[in-house]
Image (cartoon, rainbow, N blue to C red):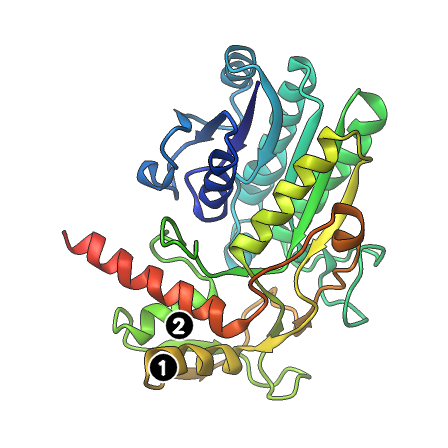
Amino acid sequence: MSVLVTGGAGYIGSHMVLALTDAGEDVVVLDNLSTGFAWAIAPGAKLVQGDIGDEELLAKIIAEHKVEAIVHFAGSIIVPESVADPLAYYNNNTVKSRALLAAAVKGGVKKFIFSSTAAVYGNPTTTPVFEDATPAPISPYGTSKLMTEYMLKDSQFAYDFNYVALRYFNVAGADPKGRTGQSTPRATHLIKVACETALGQRASMDVFGTDYPTPDGTCLRDYIHVSDLIAAHMQALKHLRAGGASGIFNCGYGKGYSVLEVIEAVGKANGKPVPHKLVPRRPGDPAGIVAGAQKVRDVLGWKPQYENLDFIVKTALDWEKHLARRNAK
């Protein structure tokens, strides 16, 4: 029996593959390598290069590798890009997820873990925001993920099938052992951009909007270390294997940091200020969003280990230095 990880060559997916292989699991990765890297996949995991929308390929993988569970990371994640090209996001994040779900049902896979997002909440009316809040996405990215959640919910009633959807807040940092990290060129994650700027790979960085209703006028986000996020996935897999019920869980720490606070933390870690410019808002960015994240602790037994912005920033900066050395070879 094996675990299929879609998007397992990407940032978060490669951390999941590491955790699974560290635990002695048999892992197969499906990735088209459009934003991921084969070298980021842990030794011992099997890579199949292909598309999650290819139901024939999916059926073959599920049968040949005796897939017991699917952890689905593959998808597009850039909010402004989704506003500019919504149909591409509905195709990649929704239509292709439907194909993956269909293959899972046909192949008898009964456990499914989905990489969802806090973007389903849009601009929440309360802080922190809990799982029972009414979804109100303000970007096609958030809507495309929410549509997959609806498909999962309907599928569990129609088929012999259970799922966990994890709504990520802002994922950052890198494997503390330095084995993988955020490696995608032109990635838009704030901490990655700040680290690249700190290391001189960018002349400066933009701060989008300074007139939000937050303490310093910049967007407020709940940053979660990628390894803690993956620990929640491992607990979700354990939960489903034990016969646990389907559910949706926020993944965050319940504390927000502003854009300017993050930039300051990166500057502190690097020993000098990070050059930045104040520019107008981007479309699709909520002012502030912080997780109400007690449910994941209570139901899945999740216990974060790296709940510290300085540590998150340090691992991200260390990875950027490693990546710079790797790319210089």
Q: Secondary structure at mark 1?
A: loop
> Whole-percent x and y of residue 188?
44, 61
Name the quarter where the N terminus is drawn: top right
**Do the residues bearing badges 1 and 2 touch, measured as CB atoms within 8 Å?**
yes
**Relative side of 267 to 23, left or right:** left
Q: Position of residue 37 (x, y in %)?
A: 34, 40
Which residue is drawn at the image coordinates 53% and 51% (left, top)? Answer: 77
Residue positioned 51% across, 46% down in the render: 76
SS state under label 2: helix
Residue 254 in sight here: yes
Q: Which dot marks residue 194?
A: 2
Q: Position of residue 129 (x, y in %)?
A: 78, 65
Relative image position of residue 147 (x, y in whole percent): 71, 41
Q: Which class describes the residues within 10 Å of circle 1: few (<14), some (14-19), or many (20+)?
A: many
Is residue 148 shown left or right of residue 6?
A: right
Q: Nearer the viewer, residue 10 or 237?
A: 237
Is residue 219 visible in the rendered image? The answer is no
Is residue 303 rendered to the left or right of residue 258?
right
Structural crowding at the residue carrying mark 2, measured as other residues with C-alpha within 10 Å and reported as few (<14), some (14–19) or many (≥20):
many
Q: Which residue is mark 1?
A: 274
**Nearest to N terminus: mark 1 or mark 2:** 2
Vertical side of 71 occupied by 192: above or below: below
Q: Is residue 140 above or below residue 24?
A: below
Residue plotted at (74% across, 60% down): 293
Number of the label disc, if any, that sits on residue 5 = none
